[in-house]
Image: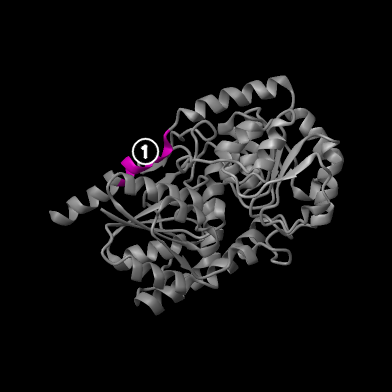
Amino acid sequence: MKFLVLTYGTDGDTRPLAALSRALMNAGHEAHLLADGATLGTAAALGVPATPIAGDIRKALQPGSGLFEKNSVNHTARELARIANESAEQWLRAAVQVGQGCDALILSGLAGFMGLSAAEYLGVKAIGTGLFPLTPTADFASPFLPPGKIPRMLNRLSHHFINGVLWRSFRKATNEARARVCSLPPRKSLWVGHPMLYGVSPALVPQPSDWPSNALICGQWLAPAPQYTPPDALAAFLSAGAPPIYIGFGSMGGFDPKQLLRSLVDGLAGRRALFYPGWSGVNPSALPPNIFVVGETPHDWLLPRCSLAVHHGGSGTSHSAARAGIPSVVVPFAGDQPFWADRLHAAGVAARLSGWKALDAASLAESIRYAERDDVRSRARAMGEKMRREDGLATAVRAIEALADGTNQEARR
C-alpha cells in the first residue's frame, strides 16, 4: 500500500513520523513524508522519501514569536493557529499533489486539518496520529490545560472544550484553503470518528477504558538506533568522570539565553553536565569546563550514559529519558509539555518546575537533588526496563494496515 504522511511542527514532532514512515516501508509499503524542511534530518538518515512544505517553524519559535509570552489556553491556541493558518493553503495543495494515488493519508500536528481535508478530496482513509492524547476521556484532562486544576468529573468535557477552541482558531483558514485548493464546501464542525493512533508509551499513559476502538496507545515511535561513534572529545569527557547530567531544551526558544546560562551554571554547582543548545540561541562559548557542549547526538545512545536529564518536557525527550531509565528535571514551556512533566512526576521519576520562567539556580539545584535520590533512580530504572520491552512501531504498523485494508475491501465490494 501507498501512504502519504503529513505533519508540521518541531523536529520532535517530525522525527516519530519519519520513524513510522520507515517502519511502513520495512513492512513492504510505500511512504512519503511532508514536513518542515528544517525537521527532515531523520527522514534523510532513514532513507524516507520526503518533501519540505511551506513554513519556518524554527523562526516561529524564536524570541519575539509570542508563543511563550503568556501561559493561557486561548493565547497558545491563537499562536499555534497563526503558525498554521499562514501556510494552510500551501500545505493542502502539497498534500493533494503528492497524495495522488495513495491508499491512506496519515496526518499529525499543526497540519492535521489540512490532512483531513486532503483525504476527503482524494477519497482515501484519514488516519490521525499524535504524540499526546487528544481523544476525549474521563481519565485525565486535556493536555493543553494545567495539570491538576480540573475536577475529575470535568475531564472529558475539558477535551471537547479545548478541541473546540483549537477548531475555532483554525476554522477560517481551513475553510478558505478547502475552497481555493479543492472546491470543497466549508467545514462547519470539528472532524470526529476518524482513527487516532498515538506514539505514546502505555507506561506513561495507559490506554483509557472509555476510548473508542479506533483510538490506540501504541508505544513510542522510535527510529532504529543508528551505528554511532561519538567524537573523540565527547568520548573523553564521558570517560573522565561520573555520568553527567544531560541538559537540553530541544526546539524551544523565546527565553533570555544569558539568564538561562547563569541559572544552569550556578544550579549545577560544579556537577559534570552535557549541554545541547538546540534552537535556544544560547552562546555556550563561556561555559566552565564541567559543562561539555554536544551537538546532534542520538538520545538512545547518549541518555543511558547520563545520570539524569534536564529538559523541556516534549513528548519525545520525556519518553527517551524515561526509556533510558534515568530521572528527569522538567522545565515546561508551552503546549503539552506541562502534561508530560506531570506524567513523569506522578510516576515518581521526575522533579518538576512550574515552568521556564521559574528556572533559577536555586530551583534547579533543588530539583536536581530530588532527581538524584535513590528511590527516584530506582523507579526510573524500573520504568526504563518496562518501556524498552514495548514495540510501538510494530503496533502502529499493524493498526494502519488493518485500517487501510478495511478501506480497500469496502471499495472493492
- Position of the C terminus, as image quadrant, is bottom left
Instruction: Say above or below: 228 vs 56.
Output: above
Q: Residues within 10 Å of mark 1 (few under 14, many from 20)?
A: some
181 or 265, nearer to the observer: 265
Kind of residue at badge 1: Ala
Verify whether residue 306 appears in magenta: no
Give the x, y percent position of residue 374. Answer: 71, 20
- Determine whether, in the image, residue 336 is placed left or right of residue 217: right
Give the x, y percent position of residue 153. Answer: 57, 38
Main SS category, magenta section: helix
**How many marks overall?**
1
Q: Which span is picked out in magenta? A: 391-400
Q: Is residue 103 visible?
A: yes
Q: Quadrant of residue 393?
A: top left
135 or 104, nearer to the observer: 104
Circle 1 SS class: helix
How has the structure been colored for display? one colour
Give the x, y percent position of residue 111. Answer: 47, 62
> Farthest front residue?
232
Q: Residue at x 20, y 53 (%)?
A: 408
Q: Residue at x 39, y 51 (%)?
A: 21
- Determine whether, in the image, residue 144 is placed left or right of residue 358: left
Instruction: Say above or below: 182 vs 116.
Output: below
Q: Residue at x 37, y 49 (%)?
A: 195
158 or 94, nearer to the observer: 94
> Farthest bottom residue?
180
Q: Is residue 161 visible?
A: no
Give the x, y percent position of residue 93. Answer: 40, 73
Instruction: Say above or below: 2 vs 211.
Output: below
> Farthest left residue?
413
Q: Kindly identify which residue carries mark 1.
A: 394
